[in-house]
Amino acid sequence: MGRKQAWIGIGMGLLAALGALSPPAAVAQSARTPDLSGLSVEELADLDVVYAASRHHQSQREAPSFVTVVTAAEIRRFGHRTLADVLRSLPSFHVTDDHNYTYVGVRGFGIPGDYNTRILLLVDGVRVNDTLYDQAFVGREFPVDMALVDRIEVVRGPGAAVYGNSAFFAVINVITRRGHHLDGGELAFEGGSRTMGGVRASYGGRRGGLDYVVSGSFWRTDGEDLFFPEFSSEPGGGFARGLDGERSGTAFAALRYQGLSLQFAHADRAKDVPTASYDTAFGDPRTATVDRSTHVAVTYERDVRGIATVARAYHGRYDYSGTYAYPDDWLFDDGSNARWWGLEWQGTTTRRGGHLLTFGGEGRWAARQRQWAREPDGPTLDVDHPSTTWGAFVQDDVRLGAHLSANVGLRYDRNGASAGRVSPRAGLVLKPTDVLTIKALYGSAFRTPNDYEQHYYTTQRSGLSAETIRTFELVVERTFGGDLHLTAAGFHSDIDALLELRTDEAGTLSFWNAGRTHAQGVEVAAEARRARELRLRASYTYQLATDRESGAVLPNAPRHTAKVTAALPLGPRVQGGLSLRYLGRRKALLGGWSDGAVLADLTASVPSLWQRLDLTLAVRNVFGTAWTDPGSAEHHQRLIPQDGRQVEIRALWRF
Amino acid sequence: MRFRSTLTAALGACLLVAGALAAEPARAPSIEDPVKAAYLYQFARFVEWPPEGPLSHGSLRICAMGPDSFVRALQQATQDKRAAARLIEAHAVRRTDDLRRCSIVFVDAGQNGAADEILRRLAGSHTLVVGEAPGFARRGGAIGFVVEDNRVRFEINVQAAQAAGLRVSARLLKIARLVDAATPEGAGR
């Protein structure tokens, strides 16, 4: 930890302590029920509530971040199938697909081969990144079906001051539908191009104060037939046919009774790998990966003497196994098994002088962190490095006047034997008028090298250190007449010791700490609503991340991105969703650039036929644009071709 | 197999907890509560009661038929507040007999079965009846909350409000979606 960071940390600790020492507010009020009586009726009607930015409910205007909330209505309107689809539609994000996993790029970064380790993913506030890879699943491996999502909060910028490890570039909180939102059963069927098919059954309701949801789903596809020019001299001439299949299943249950809730989520996914990654034999259908994860959490919320407390115990398990077929029938298997247990507690309370104080602590025990690999001759790797992590944080949201409030937060984390980390953040939120909000934000975060990075590659040298980020951000939000909302944000980040996978001169793969990296950019987003029927989101992002020493642009991040989504009526009973996005060219790891591409998706849906049936027709990549994502270190492909036009039909029956 | 045992254990635990707690019906505290409570305060400010009626003098009582968590949010939102110089009082009400002196009655979705009974009892009175069950305003309540796109909005049944002798300010009407008994589900301006 640098000396400057230490001073910033101490300063913020003092500020937070100031809040803690001030006397409690006159009315012992629960922070879970904030007092909104100061808002006008117009403000109430436009109030978007966000949790993930500060670990307590607050209006989107007050949140010390650039936040986007995606609702169930939008997910349905645009036919989003996965979290990756949702993120593709939002400013600051781009998604890369190598036909094995999906990777999320944020604000100038799209580090090839990064398993989304720098994004903290929460389901109803429960961390679902695994402990071995820190992986956040955004594809079919994500354990919650998009049909069960009530809303998704996307919080940009470092969030380590309240969340610790992994909250590096962004925090995403997926909030699931309550049983009374379902109020009965749903049976959904889908089918489409590439022999895609899926079925889901869900049931939910509220009985005697108990709110319950149970759901299960299966899904499969044959995937694309792909052509890789790098393999044109191989048998098959570079065509990978029938090698892109994917099968997944999810199970989900949630029970809530007063302040107590129980959540269970499970996903199981198998993916065939068509790219001959890691030097495997091209065209061998046996190369495939399986990812299976389970999360169980018990949460108890209650007010204790004016402090809204949340206590949670959770358990997670993640199993990966991969089969890699090499020439001459030489089969390589690897896998991992992670089991972890966690406890967390937090309290939120109001104090006199306009302080809203949030504090808490958590401990996580990774009981099992096994990684193994096997060649035909026998095992080559079998390691297990259990570890413990703990952290504590304090945060103060303080009102400094009628138009100004501040957020200061500080967190201390310790992971196993490594040195402790202090993550401060501070933000000023200025509201000079009812329609204008200006946010000036500073945040920091870290990510410790995970077990995979430290121990998977047998040639890996020890001594990897944590990577760190510091971000300065200015966000201006302006509302026009309640129907039009504009956001402009500028950011600058300094990243030190970024962990990346490299191939050295000898051709072996291992992780390294890179030097210092800069990223900066500007984002402009507009959101317009007219009545309930018409809704438009448009955004443009300019972003640039460069290596400080060489000045080289980082791979796989578009400098320019533009996105437009429009929800509009197509007929008296037909709702339409149109999505257009432009992704600028991206640098490939093996040299050269991917071409910029314009992609269009179109969704038409007829809701409430006979009150019970919803029909949806979706066409992805309407123009059949040929486009590519840059490959990663494990690929021979410089560029990996992406999905062409796909047609999908979905029917949902409510009972 | 392991997955199945986890699932069984999880469901078993759920059932045990549910069984142990199955007592007084209540709903989980929700972020919608403080928003609805703040709205009720605004309704008290932007609705006019008939000057000659019994509900237009003394303190203005807002009565909530709902769980304690909502009543707490309401008390917090109306603490020391006034509407047209009248002090606002928030009360929890359990029996429909106790609703007569209330200027505003809020009917929780958990009372859904009793909503029609409450509306019938209050017919002819000057009480502003606000509910949150789906289609509440269509069924004769003056104001019904609806949650759309992560926002709490409200529907006003102008005929129902007029029948109770209430004058709703243009400021509320501008924001509200106006409905009546004939408005089909999912429609309305």
Image (cartoon, coloured by chain):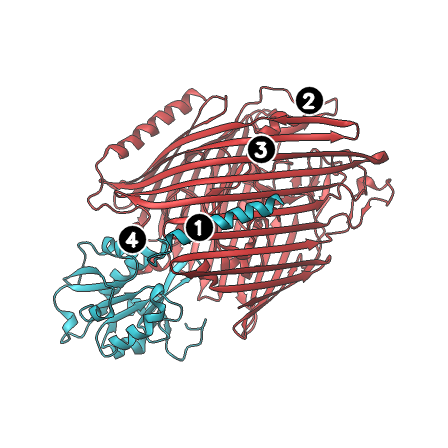
Chain colours: A red, B cyan
**Mark 1 surroundings: few (<14), some (14-19) or many (≥20) residues within 10 A:** few
Which of discs 3 and 4 lies nearer the camera? The answer is 3
- Return the x and y of residue A89 as percentages of the image width and height: 56, 52
- Of A513 and A373, nearer the camera is A373
- Residue A40 visible in the shown view: no
Q: Looking at the rendering, which quadrant does residue A479 occupy?
A: bottom left
Q: Judge whether A485 appears above or below A187 on screen.
A: above
Q: Judge whether A79 appears above or below B186 on screen.
A: above
Determine the chain carrying the residue at label 4. A
Q: Looking at the rendering, which quadrant does residue A312 occupy?
A: top left
SS label for mark 2 = loop
Pointer 4 residue: A36
Task: Please give the name of the residue rendered at 39% of the width and 71% of the height, measured from the top-left corner.
Answer: B135
Task: Please give the name of the residue rendered at 68% of the width and 50% of the height, measured from the top-left corner.
Answer: A247
Pointer 2 residue: A459
**Mark 2 surroundings: few (<14), some (14-19) or many (≥20) residues within 10 A:** few
Q: Judge whether A297 appears above or below A279 on screen.
A: below
